[in-house]
Amino acid sequence: KNEVEQSPQNLTAQEGEFITINCSYSVGISALHWLQQHPGGGIVSLFMLSSGKKKHGRLIATINIQEKHSSLHITASHPRDSAVYICAVRFLGGSQGNLIFGKGTKLSVKP
Amino acid sequence: DGGITQSPKYLFRKEGQNVTLSCEQNLNHDAMYWYRQDPGQGLRLIYYSQIVNDFQKGDIAEGYSVSREKKESFPLTVTSAQKNPTAFYLCASKTSGTVNTEAFFGQGTRLTVV
């Protein structure tokens, strides 16, 4: 079964802390997405990657294809980073465009 | 500005009634998707469409129907056959033909059966 596992499920941090959210998947993928969902429910795409590392502002996403693992890092965290972060993958051989989603990591950053 | 618009944001339905959720995009995307989100679960695919006048069932299509008469629009009808329709519904779109492209999401519709 093609699965996506995220950890931790919930995360509370103090403002300024370095945060890491992990995503593991079961079989080969063609792409991995990191998404951000705010309390209102709308989802924003943060990164799409298939190898290596990407950086945007204080956000860094890495992926290790051999270990089937990706991490999302937030440096100098801020209360406005509080949201649910979702990992989603497109498995090799899957129907075109179909993403499989993790259950999300709920991040709360305290001032 | 280009984007995806879902309406309404909140929707209440009486048991036994059909209800239609709207999804419109002006991104000129060929592919559109409907997902359902329940507390503590990942998003699950209901239906998707790669091109006008064609759509495919996703993992949880029972009790739902869709149409794709226009490229910009992909409405989802929650029928009375859906036994547990209370959920958060998200629409997404992307360009098709290339697998690894970014998906764009709407703001979602929260449906509550009363």
Image (spheres, rainbow, N blue to C red):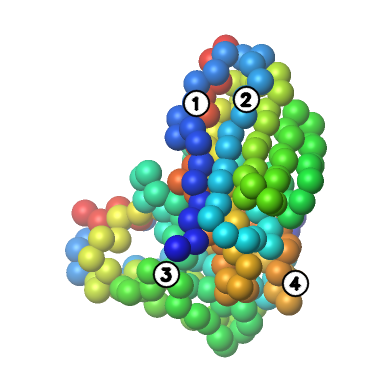
Determine whether the residue tagged by mark 2 lies in a helix, strand or loop: strand
Residue at mark 3 to residue at mark 1: CA–CA distance = 30 Å
Which residue is identified by label 1? A11
The residue beneath circle 4 is: B98
**Same chain for marks 1 and 4?**
no
| Mark 4 vs 2: CB contact within 8 A | no
Q: Which residue is mark 2?
A: A19
Task: Determine the CA span between mark 3 and mark 4.
Answer: 22 Å
Q: 10 Å neighbourhood of mark 2: few (<14), some, or many (≥20)?
A: some
In the displayed image of the protein, which residue is found farthest to the front?
Answer: A66
Where in the figure is residue A97, as x and y percent of width and height?
Answer: 62, 69
Please identify the quadrant where the C terminus of chain A is shown.
top right
Q: Position of residue B19 (x, y in %)?
A: 34, 68
Name the image quarter holding the N terminus of chain A. bottom left
Cβ atoms at labels 1 and 2 below 8 Å apart: yes
Circle 3/circle 1 CB separation < 8 Å: no
